[in-house]
Image (cartoon, rainbow, N blue to C red):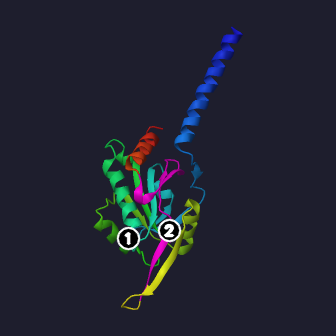
């Protein structure tokens, strides 16, 4: 009887170990993003706290800037494709958030225009702009780098520049934990969708 009990106990431990191992292999990242909150303005100039605004949502997240000639539009489009292909039964569980790392040029109005041109649905999408301090703190939290380069002045005498930056889409779970990163401009849409589906069943 004792040997049978020990065998059952051992099998239970093996099953639990396998479950936790599988979760870790799928999502090697497990970073709590909720310990600090940063203030931003959304596309309607409403003050919000991040990541408080994603509470209880699965979130597809990226940092971009609207003057970007290539990577950022591709990243945003990939996020749009993820939203478009989400199954109807989990669409309401998922939020899409973009923060500009170029707040000096990307005002809420500029971000709103950026979104409208791309036909982003503001019921599911939030675009944020804030102070350099808050922006830098979020960049540090996500390990994102952005360095201004190729500065020049346009015909109106305004400073113009491109930004060399990290190319990334991130997935955040319902508890505000960073779970996975993908290369934003060339992300595998199906991989992100499968990861979202997995989180929605937790």
Q: Is-magenta flag for residue 176?
A: yes
Which secondary structure, mark 1? helix
Relative vertical location of residue 79 with respect to residue 127 in this rendering, above or below: above
Taking depth in this image into account, of 21 and 125 the one nearest to the observer is 21
Please state, as top left, top right, bottom left or bottom right, where the N terminus lies in the image. Answer: top right
Relative vertical location of residue 108 with respect to residue 6 in this rendering, above or below: below
Taking depth in this image into account, of 161 and 103 the one nearest to the observer is 161
Q: Is-magenta flag for residue 9?
A: no
In the figure, is residue 32 to the left or right of 102?
Answer: right
Categorize mark 2 by other alpha carbons within 10 Å: few (<14), some (14-19), many (20+): some
User: What's the residue at 45%, 70% (across, down)?
Assistant: 129
Q: In this orientation, does residue 35 appear?
A: yes
Which secondary structure, mark 2? strand
**Which of pointers 2 and 1 lies earlier in the amino acid sequence?**
1
What residue would you read off at disc 1?
111
How many numbered dots are placed on residues in this image?
A: 2
Relative vertical location of residue 117 with respect to residue 27 in this rendering, above or below: below
Categorize mark 1 by other alpha carbons within 10 Å: few (<14), some (14-19), many (20+): many
Across and down, in percent, residue 139 comes to 55, 65
Taking depth in this image into account, of 94 and 86 the one nearest to the observer is 86
- Point out the frontmost of discs 2 and 1: 2
In the figure, is residue 143 to the left or right of 111?
Answer: right
Across and down, in percent, residue 111 comes to 38, 70
In the figure, is residue 190 to the left or right of 63?
Answer: left
Mark 2–mark 1 distance (CA, rounded to whole Å): 18 Å
Taking depth in this image into account, of 197 and 78 the one nearest to the observer is 78
The single residue placed furthest to the top in the displayed view is: 1
Across and down, in percent, residue 65 comes to 43, 70
Q: Which residues are magenta?
A: 158-187
What residue would you read off at disc 2?
165
User: What's the residue at 32%, 61% (across, down)?
Assistant: 120
Across and down, in percent, residue 194 comes to 41, 42
């Amino acid at each position: 009887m004792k040997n049978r009990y020990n065998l059952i106990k051992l099998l239970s431990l093996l099953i639990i170990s396998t479950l936790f191992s599988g979760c870790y292999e799928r999502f090697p990242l497990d970073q709590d993003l909720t310990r600090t909150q940063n203030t931003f303005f959304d596309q309607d100039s409403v003050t919000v706290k991040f990541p408080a605004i994603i509470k209880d949502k699965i979130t597809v997240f990226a940092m971009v800037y609207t003057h970007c000639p290539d990577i950022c539009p591709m990243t945003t489009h990939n996020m749009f494709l993820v939203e478009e292909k989400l199954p109807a039964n989990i669409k309401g569980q998922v939020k899409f958030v973009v923060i500009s790392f170029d707040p000096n040029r990307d005002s809420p109005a500029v971000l709103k225009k950026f979104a409208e041109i791309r036909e982003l649905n503001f019921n599911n999408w939030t675009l944020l702009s804030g102070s350099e301090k808050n922006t830098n703190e979020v960049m540090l939290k996500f390990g994102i780098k952005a360095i201004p380069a190729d500065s020049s002045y346009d015909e109106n005498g305004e400073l113009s520049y491109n930004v060399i930056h990290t190319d990334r889409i991130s997935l955040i779970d319902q508890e505000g934990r960073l779970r996975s990163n993908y290369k934003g401009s060339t992300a595998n849409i199906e991989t992100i969708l499968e990861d979202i589906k997995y989180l929605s069943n937790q």
